[in-house]
Image (tube, grey):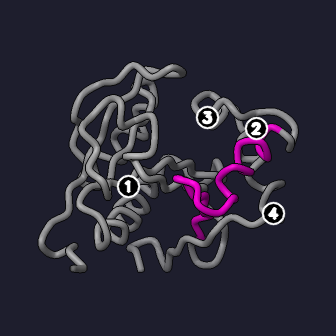
Amino acid sequence: MTVMGEFRLRPVEEGDLPLITSWMNDPAVAAFWELAGPPEVTERHLRPQLAPGGPSRPYLGLLGGEPISYWEVYQAARDRLADHYPAGPDDLGVHLLIGPPSARGRGLGAVLIDAVAGELLRDCARVVAEPDVRNTASVRSFERAGFRRAGELQLPEKRAVLMIRERTRTESGR
């Protein structure tokens, strides 16, 4: 439960492709995700994540039962990000987009990031993210959700801010 209502993640299913494609084609999303185009573009991005055993898993975020966000939760040590910081073996990374334009700019990102990070930190020591430095709204949302800036990284497709949130005693599920 969040201050905005009941929120949960559910694994992406084949039938979610049209919705996710529509979000990827929103200019505000496309500027950072670079996955605008026909459904095949989004499908090529999702397909490897849906395969068993991969380092990344896609999820839809449901607020009050309605799709509101798209998430990718990945094993940071098995991601290219591990080349840029000392990734722990159980560090988890997140990518996030808020889908409907009407849901943006209301502080929802920070609330959802906090909820997801809190859950992930029950099973890992750190959650990391690497939003584009130009995406100031995303960076602010991660900061409001308890992440700290750990530096900037030059990745092949963007200049990113490395954001890290470490588990606190109250988040420990072990």
Q: Is residue 58 magenta?
A: yes
Note whether residue 78 is visible.
yes
Q: Residues within 10 Å of mark 3 (few under 14, many from 20)?
A: some
First of labels 2, 1 by sequence position: 2
First of labels 2, 4 by sequence position: 4
Q: Residue at x 52, y 53 (%)?
A: 55
Q: Which residue is mark 3?
A: 33
- Whether 113 is drawn above or below 66: the answer is above
Q: Is residue 171 magenta?
A: no
The three-letter code of the residue at mark 4 reads Glu
The CA span between labels 4 and 1 is 24 Å
Residue 92's disc is 1
Residue 135's disc is none
Picture quarter with the N terminus: bottom left
Q: Secondary structure at mark 1?
A: strand
Say whether residue 104 is left or right of residue 154. Answer: right
Q: For the magenta stretch, what is the residue range?
A: 41-62
Residue 14's disc is 4
The three-letter code of the residue at mark 2 reads Asn
Q: Which residue is mark 2?
A: 25
The CA span between labels 4 and 3 is 20 Å
- Whether 27 is drawn above or below 11: the answer is above
The three-letter code of the residue at mark 1 reads Leu
| Residue depth check, mark 4 versus mark 3: number of the one nearer the observer | 4
The CA span between labels 2 and 4 is 18 Å
Say whether residue 50 is left or right of residue 55. Answer: right
Q: Residue at x 35, y 62 (%)?
A: 117
The reply to whether dot 3 and dot 2 touch (C-beta < 8 Å) is: no
